[in-house]
Amino acid sequence: MERLRSDDIVKLAFSVIICMIPAFVGAMINAKAIPTWYAFANKPPFSPPDWIFAPVWTGLYILMAVALFLIWRKGIDFPGVAVAIWAFAVQLLLNGLWTPVFFGLRAPLAGLVVIGLLWVAILITIVKFFALSRAAAVMLIPYLAWVSFATAVNAAFYLLNR
């Protein structure tokens, strides 16, 4: 394993910060939506309890940050790195968009569209990361699994509340 260089510390810190932005935005929106609209909506029986989201997402965002760091530390000029980082940026943007759409706008159908696009973007990111670092790609698999489950919950929620 390579030793951390001084610029690696900056890249790792930035990777963590950038990945936590959707978490903070989502937490602010969820704090208003969960006790009101969402609490009284019909939820599918397989919908997880509200308390599980914070620890699961925290772990996923940390894995995402480390995966991003492993790719970025190869150097932006390394073949494939820039494209992989753009793919990561797109999925992170979609990730950050889902909560304001689903909870903020109270729009489960639009949320389903966003999460479907997110799923595809995560898969593309995994493929791009795999070409550069198997470890980075593997770190995103739990994220894809959780978003797959969340997609099913979102779809069922939409069907129960339309």
Image: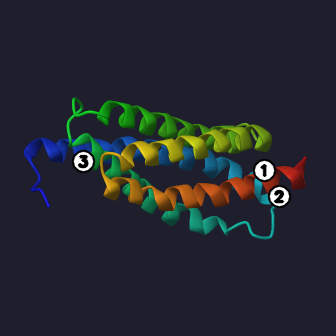
**Where the N terminus falls, by quadrant?**
bottom left
What type is the residue that disc 1 sits on?
Answer: Trp
Kindly identify which residue carries mark 3: 12
What type is the residue that disc 3 sits on?
Answer: Leu
Kindly identify which residue carries mark 2: 40
Q: Which mark lies nearer to you, 2 or 3?
A: 3
| Quarter holding residue 94 | top right
Judge from the rendering whether residue 76 lies leftward or rightward of residue 36; answer left or right: left
For the point 63% across and 39% down, the residue is 117
| Residue 115 coordinates in the image, percent (x, y) | 65, 44
Could you tell me if residue 35 is visible in this image? no
Q: Which mark lies nearer to you, 1 or 3?
A: 3
Give the CA separation, mark 2 to mark 1.
Answer: 6 Å
Q: Earlier in the sequence, mark 2 or mark 3?
A: 3
- Determine whether 40 is above or below 88 in the image: below
Dots 2, 1 in contact, CB < 8 A: yes
For the point 61% across and 51% down, the residue is 31
Kindly identify which residue carries mark 1: 37
Total number of numbered labels? 3
Circle 1 — which element? helix
Could you tell me if residue 104 is visible in this image? yes
* Closer to the camera in the image, 156 or 76: 76
For the point 56% across and 46% down, the residue is 26
What type is the residue that disc 2 sits on?
Answer: Phe
